[in-house]
Amino acid sequence: MVPRGPLFRSSATPSIFCCLSKLVSRPFSLTGCFALTLYVSLLFIFFLFYPLHRNFPDDLEREETLFMEETQQVIEERLWRPSLSRGFRPCTKPTSRYEGPKYWNRYLTVRSNGGLNQMRAGICDMVAVARILNATLVIPQLDKRSFWRDSSTFSDIFDEDHFIATLQGDVPIIKELPKELDSVARARKHFTSWSGMKYYLEIAELWKDYQVIHVPKSDSRLSNNDLPIDIQRLRCRAFYYALRFSPPIEQLGKKLVGRLKSHGRYISLHLRYEKDMLSFTGCTYGLSDEEAEELKIMRENTNHWKTKKINATEQRIGGYCPLTPKEMGIFLKALGHPPSTWIYIAAGEIYGGDAHLSELRSYFPNLVFKETVATSEELEPFAKHASQTAALDYIISVESDVFVPSYSGNMARALEGHRRFLGHRKTFSPDRKGLVEVFDKMERGKLKEGQKLSSRITEMHKFRQGAPRKRLGALPGVKGRGRFRTEESFYENPFPECICSSRNLTN
Ligand SMILES: *[C@@H]1O[C@H](CO)[C@@H](O)[C@H](O)[C@H]1NC(C)=O
Ligand SMILES: *[C@@H]1O[C@H](CO)[C@@H](O)[C@H](O)[C@H]1NC(C)=O
């Protein structure tokens, strides 16, 4: 008889008594003794191991669950938790030396150029420049001629009154130039890119001859570094507090964030896979010949894009191409995000539409867009205005649990900085050059999706998740003014001026 768990135990007790009673009543037999010894031994062994045997599967299950829970928790932490802020917090208050503005009877008029986020940075820089020049700032005009062809005015996109009121302790701001100054001669001045205090103090000499200085372009006119702390903090107050989106945009933005969060956590993916982007960068990887040709023609016909001949392969290998929807799918999966993850696509119209998006959707079926989170009635007032829909994307991306851009650019930079400012929310900066190397290996069949790829990509991005660190300076070896271009931009990382350690009580 082979002991078989509970079945055996239930019958064991009666049978041993039966055997013992037989032994007492019958003459001793060797076979009987052997059988009994074997029986008792087996029984003994069985009882010895029985409890273990009983409990073993439960314990194993419990241990496995514990192990899985821990791993799951570790993964969750790694995927979603903001980088440890280590006691850092926003600090934008002026120093004790800072004085309120004086109402000078001289004015700075500005035309902001570029897309939404280039204009936002430019506007905040002009607030700082007006402060340096002791000027009254006139609400800037917005770019209506950029690629985005948006006719929105300042107050369509931004909360004008809030902007003026928030900065009243810094710079006087008025909505329009006083009528009597409309006809006076203005100094029209293209400020030199990335200028510092010395330059603007020279510019201030213009006040001797002019009452109005007009600035036709506002992008990158102020240096990232080496400015007084109070000027840097003013830039932050302008960017993070004063330049709020207009109430209709803010309201819808918040509503959409609420809807997304009701499903749990979400990633905002800034998928720069729009026609202009691909045409401008000359990146054709993964596109059909017809598509590549179409982009080439667009590039040749766009006068202000200087580079016409681009080798797409070299662009890609150099890490100068936006990652494709499929590549973003491989990337996010390799980081450990499960297929059920909700991904909000912050972008304009994706080139090629579903043909390219489907490659990302095969990894992450829960792709959502403005059009899926909002009703068409809700979107209708903003639909014809690229800057206003970009503002919705901005709000949804600031509030997302994870933000990841497929390409760098003004929006990606602004969001990275803003998320740092708000407590180092998780923000991935894909290492495009390194990733392309990996993807090409996969293409050649030398690497497959799986654990190895996953650890490689995770390791590659260990220090690219928006953890606190000082803003990076110029790349070594770059000489002259070109070095400014290689600096990390102020709004990309306002550390250390506007992000301080809690221990530092002077802030
Ligand atoms: C601006 O005004 C302050 C005094 O309020 C003065 O110290 C400073 O030199 C002025 N700056 C310029 C550029 O005129
Ligand atoms: C583009 O660059 C790659 C790599 O340097 C090279 O192999 C290829 O021949 C180039 N293509 C053209 C059309 O010049």
Image (spheres, rainbow, N blue to C red):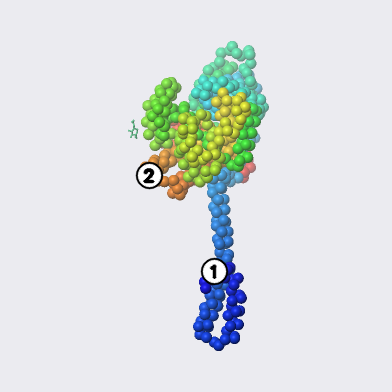
Quadrant in the rendering for residue 497: top right
Query: Would you say 342 lies left or right of 290 here?
Result: right
10 Å neighbourhood of mark 2: few (<14), some, or many (≥20)?
few
Depth order, front residue of 263/438: 263
On residue 4, the disc is 1
Residue 195 in the image: state x and y as whole percent.
Answer: 51, 28
Give the amino acid type for the residue marked by disc 1 in the picture.
Arg
Residue 167 seen in this snapshot: no
Quadrant in the rendering for residue 93: top right
Distance (Cα) linking label 2 and label 1: 51 Å
Query: Would you say 161 lies left or right of 324 here?
Result: right
Question: Residue tagged by mark 2?
Answer: 445
Task: Determine the residue positioned at 59% across, 21% down.
Answer: 153
Residue 423 in the image: state x and y as whole percent.
Answer: 59, 41
Task: Determine the residue positioned at 60% across, 79% down.
Answer: 18
Mark 2 or mark 1, earlier in chain: 1
Look at the numbered discs 2 and 1 and tell me whether their residues touch, using CB distance below 8 Å.
Answer: no
Queried on whether the Cβ of the residue with tag 1 lies below 8 angstroms from ligand 2, the answer reads no
Give the amino acid type for the residue marked by disc 2 in the picture.
Gly
Depth order, front residue of 294/501: 294
Query: Would you say 39 lies left or right of 303 here?
Result: right
Query: Would you say 312 lies left or right of 353 here?
Result: left
